[in-house]
Amino acid sequence: MMITEAYIREELKQVKDPEIPTISIVDLGIVTGIKIDNTDVHVTLTPTFAGCPALRLMEEMVVDHLNTNNKLGNISVETSFETTWTTDLITPEGHVAIKKHGLAPPRRNCSNISMEILESTNCPYCDSENTSMKSPFGPTLCRSLHYCNNCKQAFEGFKPV
């Protein structure tokens, strides 16, 4: 069997984000490069934020997962900031996975972030637009805190960047 980028990308869909375990690192859009040389594989990750505390863990998870495949040779992973990660890199499947985790997915194509965009977040539980932002700062850099006035649920929103 020939090892292809598509094959490695499909394998990496099994590697989940440690902070949002319903989404793969592929669907989160942080796998920004895959190079194959015979059976050796080099994966490039671009973090969602420069200070992402889970970055080293994700690198290890990629190596560990790909090492379970006896068809592959040397596995290497690097972190790169050459490509800027944005929430537009999250796949449609990723949006579903984020919502499944109880987070409001980010809006698409938000090149100019404003408080209005952060505040206009649909509830991930009932899909209501009748929500209010309680704080632009959530438990991680990429989240904000919201409240749904319809179903009375507090929830976190994934910030668009």
Image: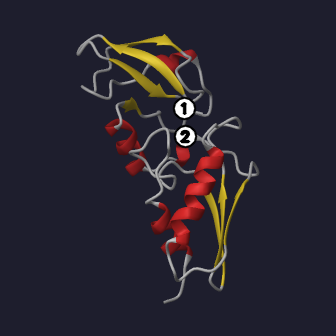
Residue drawn at x 45%, y 67% is 10
Classify mark 2: residues with Cα within 10 Å, few (<14), some (14-19) or many (20+): many
In this view, the residue in front, 149 or 79, is 79
Residue drawn at x 36%, y 13% is 147
Residue 130 lies left or right of residue 121; in this view the side is: left
Query: Image quadrant of residue 13?
Result: bottom left
Residue drawn at x 66%, y 50% is 46
Residue drawn at x 40%, y 42% is 95
Classify mark 1: residues with Cα within 10 Å, few (<14), some (14-19) or many (20+): many
Q: Circle 2 — which element?
A: helix
Query: Spatial distance from mark 1 to mark 2, Cα to Cα?
Result: 6 Å
Going by the numbered disc 2, the residue's amino acid type is Thr
The mark found on residue 87 in the picture is 2
Q: Quadrant of the C terminus?
A: top right
Q: Which residue is mark 1?
A: 160
**Label 1 with label 2: CB-CB less than 8 Å:** yes
Question: Residue 139: horizontal and vertical position, in percent?
Answer: 53, 22
